[in-house]
Amino acid sequence: MTEPRPVPQPQASRSRLRRFFAVAGPGIVVMLADSDAGGMITAAQSGAEWGYRLLPLQFLLVPLLYVVQELALRLGVVSQKGQARLIRENFGAFWAMVATTALIVASFGALLTEFSGLAGVSALFHVPVPLTMAMVVAGLSAMAYFGSYLTVERIAIAIGAFELVFLWVAFQAEPDLAEITREALDVPVSEPRYLYLVAANIGAAIMPWMIFYQQSAVVEKKLKVADLPAARLDTAFGAILTQLVTAAVLIATTATLGGERGGASLTSIGEIAGALTPFLGQEIGKLVFALGITGAAIVATIVVTLASARTISDMLGFDQPLGHRAREARWFYGSYTAMLIAAALIITSGVDLVNLSVAVQVMNALFLPLVLGFLFLLARRLPRPYRLEGGYASAIAVLLAGTGLLAVFTAIAGIGG
């Protein structure tokens, strides 16, 4: 029996690279959606009120974000089932309904923040908000009704890439490194408003719909266990990228407005645009901001609505992915379209967009113990060698429990204060 010839190193590297590009997508899309309009607004508010004091938190959230999404990825690849279906099969219909309800509430809140960001951009360019909402609903409905999963994934990545302009904005702000160090070490844990924004930033980084989306997306993309290494790299790259974008928004806002404890509070999308872009010039700055926030809002809208529609179908026991005819997948397309229309109608009513966006992130933080608990318990039930067990499982349990408790504590303390 002849020994197999070793694959030359350059050829092996090209093979791994091809595998990565074939597998990559769900992790990057969900992470681009993570740095959504609500997250951008929360980061801007954090910088305006507390300077660089919340900057270290953005980087501390990177490993936590990766751990959470890697578990969702693992569950999807190994089980080939969505989160709601796994909860129903392992814990019963009642708990599946509870988890699905939490997802829908969180998703609808997130959808309101995405549409609020788009409405704010409309106001910057004096475009009627109802017209913008109608165009967005029509465009995203057409994309879902006539596109396949891969088409939607490519559209989401292309639009979400506009978020990278915020990295350039932060570089142009020329932040003071000495000031960053001084404020980063100042942690005002006795200030309720600071704790409220800690909760909001945690809720902005880890959202229920992200877990449901990535697990369903890897199933729909038909990823196998052999794809896990490349898919994990996809998720890690996305986790770093999204927190860099969020940190960039905080840095740029702080360089303009922040610095003093309990400083400025932003009340409109226009104020955020003005805070982020004065060093770019009014017209260029407005355009750059509009591209970034629009990219963030659209990709998050795609992820949020697809996650909710898939989960509702999953909970009811229907296999209704993208690409099915609307008549064959009534629950999927019906819930997808209904969410878009309902959110558009609420946004045209003229609600306080900035406070709404921050409040939604705090609500996400309050949902974290439930969502992370199910994620951990389901990962413990996977077959070996993919099961979460041993020392790693203990470390993950401590990490997730600590995160859930911190999120709830800071949210309640902030609200109570």
Image (cartoon, rainbow, N blue to C red):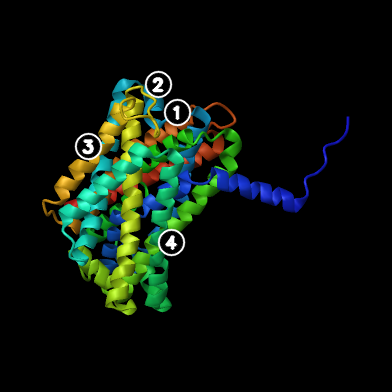
What's the distance in space between the residues labelled 4 and 2, CA to CA? 38 Å
What's the distance in space between the residues labelled 1 and 3, CA to CA? 24 Å
- Horizontal arrangement in the rendering, residue 400 relative to residue 120 (left or right): right
Residue situated in front as seen by the camera: 310 or 393? 310
- Horizontal arrangement in the rendering, residue 348 relative to residue 54 (left or right): left
> Which residue carries the number 4 mark?
244
> Which residue carries the number 1 mark?
81
Instruction: Please report contact status of discs 3 and 4: CB closer than 8 Å, yes or no.
Output: no
Q: Residues within 10 Å of mark 2 (few under 14, many from 20)?
A: few
Question: Residue 65: in sight, yes or no?
Answer: no
> Which residue carries the number 2 mark?
89
Q: Position of residue 126 (x, y in %)?
A: 17, 65
Above or below for 127 versus 146: below
Q: Position of residue 347 (x, y in %)?
A: 16, 50
Q: Nearer the viewer, mark 4 or mark 1?
A: 1
What's the distance in space between the residues labelled 3 and 2, CA to CA? 27 Å
